[in-house]
Amino acid sequence: MTTATKAATMNLDGQLLLPGDDDYDQARAVWNAMVDRRPRLIARCASVADVVTAVRTARELDLEIGVRCGGHSGTGLAVPDGGLMIDLTPLNDVSVDPVRRRAIVRGGALLGALDRAAQAHGLATTAGNVSHTGVGGLTLGGGMGWLARQYGLACDNVESYQVVTAAGEVVRASRDEHPDLFWGLRGGGGNFGIVTEFEFRLHDTGTRTLVAEYDFPLERAAAALRAWRDLNAEAPRRATFTASVGRNGLTTLGFVWVGDPAAARAYLPALRALGRPVAARVTEPSYVALQTREDSVQGHTYRRYSKGHYLRTLPDAAIEAFLLRGTESGHGSYAPNAGLQAYGGAIDEVPDADAAFSHRGTVFEWGTGMRWTDAGEDAARMAASRAAAATLAPYASGVYVNALADEGAEGVRRAYPAAKLARLRTVKDVYDPDNVFHLNQNIRPTGR
Ligand code: FAD
């Protein structure tokens, strides 16, 4: 049967898009404007039955599958060239039970929808820092956010998942049902099936936060960073320490606090240890405002490339490398902005064997960010980002799977230690032995 003939019989509750259709180009566009791939079919799924139909159709027609939630994967893994894109964006509703403190979040929802629905009741769960990121990709890779030091990663707060498997079956995964699948979904990415529903635990966080930021000039930045690192070791869980360095020559240090701002203000004097800043900003955004404050700077339509590392320690030499951003490598003119975000607290309290997510002993995550519009700059920008990452590599203990770009199998080996990877393979063997879901940071089944 040809693709066109089969497509005509697909009968979705949602919409099927083919090249040339009005919404086709908008549907295949993702966060990184460098991604320009053309699926043969886009199934905009509006029901679980649609997802089942799409998986079965793709397998019948031997079309590569890409799964789209927020479209934020750095390399555009959601968009298969010539394949079938399973677009979950119509499956985007969130319902909150404030009494049981649970949120049912469908597989195509964005973080903003979860935050807004939960905050209407003064509740929240761990979600990332940019509201147009997908709950799907973020949670399946782990999910780091401002609440993680208090409540664990996003994946640590999932009670159960509804999943469409590679065989086109609908199953539920929890500690009691398909516990091996549940384990794999907690950090193993989109390797084991398509999640159509997440059941999250919510917490009584209130709606208030405080953000403290202090700017230091380059000559005082290393000393300030060393003091910031030392303070972090004893920081309250409500504080997530942050550092950034960029093209303006300033290093910004501080923390994000979720909870009563009065308690955060009582903690502020500790930051005097950093030295004298040239500027200081202390603001009290609502939690929802905090969760959207990077939305514009992280907006769509730009070309993007980034790198990441996990660090268990931040020795003085790593601080020097952080500040230099690879500028000494010859790629200096395009050196990326770089940042550090603290882990620890509840993240590290979950036993390592509990979930596929790895490197819970991470103290800081390092990452770069840059955006540009001229395709002629692609190679130089990417080289500069790689050069910055290379200078931090000697201090790295691994990488967050959701921070991987185009590192391939080597990146996957950095994201999961060998024993985790071996166990992930056994789960893959059961739920996706043909590697139908491989447009992801791929866990290969045994023998493939
Ligand atoms: P998509 O490109 O739609 O999906 C990525 C992959 O996830 C897909 O290829 C598929 O394999 C899988 N997938 C997505 N949804 C499903 C589903 N429902 N079922 C099965 N598989 C699915 N990460 C953090 O932890 N914390 C942050 O604060 C954070 N901030 C970010 C900010 C920005 C601007 C960006 C670009 C990324 C950020 N990330 C953060 C990284 C983010 O977690 C990953 O990029 C993640 O893959 C994005 O998920 P998505 O659903 O938006 O992406």
Image: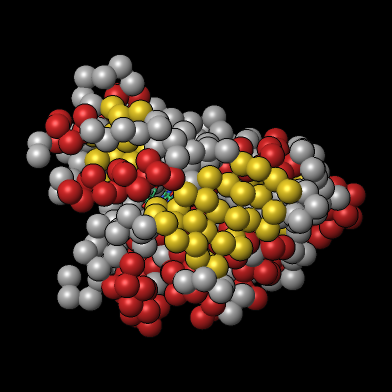
229 in relation to 108, above or below? below
Horizontally, is 418 left or right of 92 in the view?
left
Q: Nearer the viewer, residue 405 or 60?
A: 60
Question: Which residue is located at x 35 percent, y 48 percent?
Answer: 52
Residue 199 in percent (x, y) is at: 60, 55
Residue 46 in percent (x, y) is at: 44, 35
Extreme-left residue of the structure? 1
Colour pattern of the rendering: secondary structure
Quarter of the picture containing the N terminus is top left
Q: Nearer the viewer, residue 366 or 130?
A: 130
Question: Which residue is located at x 17 percent, y 70 percent?
Answer: 448
Kindly tell me whether residue 389 is visible in this rendering: no
Horizontally, is 315 left or right of 412 in the view?
right
Kindly tell me whether residue 4 is visible in this rendering: yes
Question: How many numbered marks are there?
Answer: 0
Question: Which residue is located at x 52 percent, y 51 percent?
Answer: 197
Horizontally, is 364 left or right of 394 in the view?
right
Residue 233 in percent (x, y) is at: 69, 71
Q: Nearer the viewer, residue 203 or 75?
A: 203
Residue 11 in percent (x, y) is at: 31, 33
Extreme-top residue of the structure? 22
Question: Which residue is located at x 49 percent, y 74 percent?
Answer: 179
Horizontally, is 36 left or right of 127 in the view?
left
332 in relation to 186, above or below? above
Q: Nearer the viewer, residue 253 or 23?
A: 23
Quadrant in the rendering for residue 18: top left
